[in-house]
Amino acid sequence: MGKGGARAVEWQNNDRMIHHETSELVSTFSSEPTCVVVSPDAELMVVGTGKGTLHFINTQTGQEVKSLVSSCDGISSCVFLLDGRLATTSFDGRIEIWDIGNGCR
């Protein structure tokens, strides 16, 4: 954790996420990340990829806690909705709304 409880990670247009301060490998993905969003409670970071996978990362441990696969042609953006669900858009123009608790669209 950084000062004030902040944690910084980075990816440089590849499939690896690196801890900004320690340069340690945090996670790898099935393809290059295309978007990232942090949950309102700051407990999860969701990373969308060009192959349509959503990776759910615990922000405290850096460990992946689950992954979901979209039926679309790659995730282009993701955002948490006020009710806790996750909305994603895809490169083929689809919008999907996810109940992340049970993994259903």
Image (spheres, helix red, strand yellow):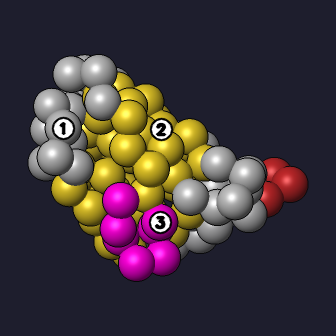
Q: Looking at the picture, does residue 7 appear above or below residue 52?
A: below
Q: Which numbered disc, 2 or 3, marks the residue that appears first in the sequence?
A: 2
Q: Report the magenta residues as a range.
A: 99-105
Q: Is residue 33 at all visible to an observer of this figure?
A: no
| Residue type, numbered disc 3 | Asp
Q: Which residue is mark 3?
A: 99
| Residue type, numbered disc 1 | Cys
Front residue of 100/57: it is 100
Looking at the image, residue 15 sits to the left or right of residue 99; the answer is: left
Q: Main secondary structure of the magenta part?
A: loop
Q: Which residue is mark 1?
A: 72
Res. 37 mark: none
Q: Is residue 60 at all visible to an observer of this figure?
A: yes
The location of residue 30, given as percent across then percent down, is 13, 48
Q: Residue at x 47, y 38 (%)?
A: 78
| Residue type, numbered disc 2 | Cys
Judge depth for marks 2 and 3 and give the one in front: 3
2 and 3 marks in contact (CB < 8 Å): no
The residues bearing labels 2 and 3 have C-alpha atoms spaced at a distance of 13 Å
The residues bearing labels 3 and 1 have C-alpha atoms spaced at a distance of 17 Å
Looking at the image, residue 41 sits to the left or right of residue 105; the answer is: right
Q: Which residue is mark 2?
A: 78
Looking at the image, residue 90 sits to the left or right of residue 83; the answer is: left
Q: Is residue 101 magenta?
A: yes
Q: Which numbered disc, 1 or 2, marks the residue that appears first in the sequence?
A: 1
